[in-house]
Image: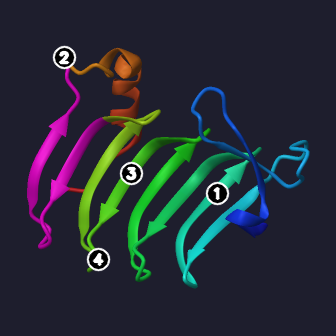
Amino acid sequence: MRKMKYHDLFVKDDIHTDEHIFYIDENNTVLFNGVIVDYNNGVLVWEFEVQDGFRTGIERVYYPTGELQELNETDHNTTNGIAKEFYKNGQLRSQSIVARNVHIITITYDETGDIVETWEISEEDLSYNVVRDKIPEYRSRYKLEQ
């Protein structure tokens, strides 16, 4: 898979999400496919898969010291699927099932791995109607670690 640095590509903002669409050329005519990486002071801080110019696939965010901070499934510039956050020591901090950037369920852990909180979207949540029809499908498709 082709790998390029974030700043070596050209971008145009997506009118729907205000997120970047990535192109190989400055005229924004050839969409990028591959992996984009971003470094800060020589340390990898972000890498993500891109299909047809959109963040689609696996996204990894790293602490400035190089440890994995987030691991997200993405689709068309949105978090869609499983999203995980980690403590610097590698222990799972939280994991969520997410539909188009809307968290359906989140389990939060302390640094020793014990569950601190389990949160689920409710009908009172402003985003509920956006994902209401996807909740059963996503709960059966994506399984969270217990």
CA gap between label 1 and label 3 equals 15 Å
* Mark 2 neighbour density, 10 Å: few (under 14) some (14–19) many (20 or more): few
How far apart, in angstroms, are the residues tagged by discs 3 and 2?
23 Å
Q: Nearer the viewer, residue 123 or 42?
A: 42
Q: Quadrant of the C terminus?
A: bottom left
As drawn, the label of residue 124 is 2
Q: Quadrant of residue 77?
A: top right
Q: Nearer the viewer, mark 3 or mark 2?
A: 2
What number is the disc on residue 49? 1
Q: Secondary structure at mark 2?
A: loop
The CA span between labels 4 and 2 is 34 Å
Do labels 4 and 2 touch, CB within 8 Å?
no
Find out whether residue 42 is within the magenta segment: no
Q: Label 1 to label 4, Cα distance in Å?
A: 23 Å
How far apart in space, not on screen, are marks 2 and 1 (Cα)? 34 Å
Q: Helix, strand or loop at disc 1? A: strand
Q: Main secondary structure of the magenta part?
A: strand
Disc ID at residue 132: none
Pointer 3 local density, CA inside 10 Å: few below 14, some 14–19, many at least 20: many
Count up the numbered dots: 4
Residue position marked by numbered label 3 in the rendering: 83
Q: Which residue is mark 4?
A: 88
The reply to whether the C-beta atoms of the residues labelled 4 and 3 are less than 8 Å apart is: no
